[in-house]
Image (cartoon, rainbow, N blue to C red):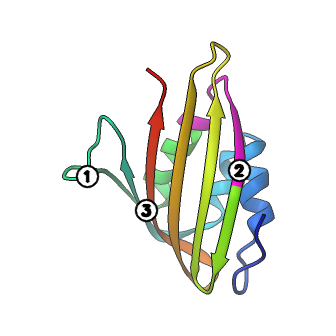
């Protein structure tokens, strides 16, 4: 797993939020002015989905974590104010999703995240 990165950031809270389907726990790890860029089949690198601020991020997290699927944080690496992690997901019908994220921290809160995700088709 990982270790705490600076004051206030807790990789165990990240794991609990991901694996426990707890959008509120995850949202608490983000700074008010955080930004997430999502790259996948539908939002490719030249036009990624960009979510700005906790309100937009919170809506996305609520949508993802209310779905009938399991989430698992497989790897987490912390170095200074950078965190990288792998999340694997499984829908009841067997469809799998894999996401890789790289995050930047400020004062122990996530300020920038780039997530690249792929899923079975």
Vertical placement of residue 20 versus 109, above or below: above
Q: Are marks 2 and 3 in contact (CB under 8 Å)?
A: no
Give the CA separation, mark 1 to mark 3: 21 Å
Q: Are marks 2 and 1 in contact (CB under 8 Å)?
A: no
Query: Within the magenta stretch, is there residue 66?
Result: yes
Give the CA separation, mark 2 to mark 1: 24 Å
> Which label lies toward us, 1 or 3?
1
Q: Earlier in the sequence, mark 2 or mark 3?
A: 3
Left or right of 36 on screen, residue 47: left
| Nearer to the camera, 88 or 66 | 88
Query: How many numbered marks does the figure carry?
Result: 3
Residue 96 picture quarter: top right
Q: Earlier in the sequence, mark 1 or mark 3?
A: 1
Give me the disc on residue 80: none
Magenta segment boundaries in residue numbering = 63-74
> Which label lies toward us, 2 or 3?
2
**Residue bearing the label numbered 3:** 53
- Residue 80 place in picture, x, y as percent: 62, 87
| Nearer to the camera, 33 or 37 | 37
- Residue 43 place in picture, x, y as percent: 29, 42
Give me the disc on residue 73: 2
**Residue bearing the label numbered 1:** 45
Query: Within the magenta stretch, is there residue 91?
Result: no
- Residue 26 place in picture, x, y as percent: 66, 55
Q: Secondary structure at mark 1?
A: loop
Q: Secondary structure at mark 3?
A: helix
Left or right of 14 on screen, residue 49: left
Residue at 64%, 66% in the rendered image: 29
- Residue 59 place in picture, x, y as percent: 50, 43
Residue at 80%, 63% in the rendered image: 12
Q: Earlier in the sequence, mark 2 or mark 1?
A: 1
Residue furthest to the left in view is: 46
């Amino acid at each position: 797993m990982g270790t705490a990165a600076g004051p206030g950031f807790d990789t165990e809270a990240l794991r609990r939020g991901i694996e426990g389907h707890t959008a509120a726990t995850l949202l608490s790890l983000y700074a008010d002015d955080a930004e997430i860029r999502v790259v996948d089949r539908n939002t490719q690198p030249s036009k990624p989905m960009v979510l700005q601020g906790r309100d937009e991020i919170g809506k996305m997290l609520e949508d993802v974590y209310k779905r009938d699927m399991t989430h698992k944080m497989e790897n987490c690496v912390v170095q200074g104010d950078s965190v990288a992690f792998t999340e694997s997901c499984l829908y009841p019908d067997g469809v799998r999703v894999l996401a890789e994220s790289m995050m930047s921290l400020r004062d122990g809160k996530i300020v920038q995240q780039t997530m690249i995700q792929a899923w079975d088709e």
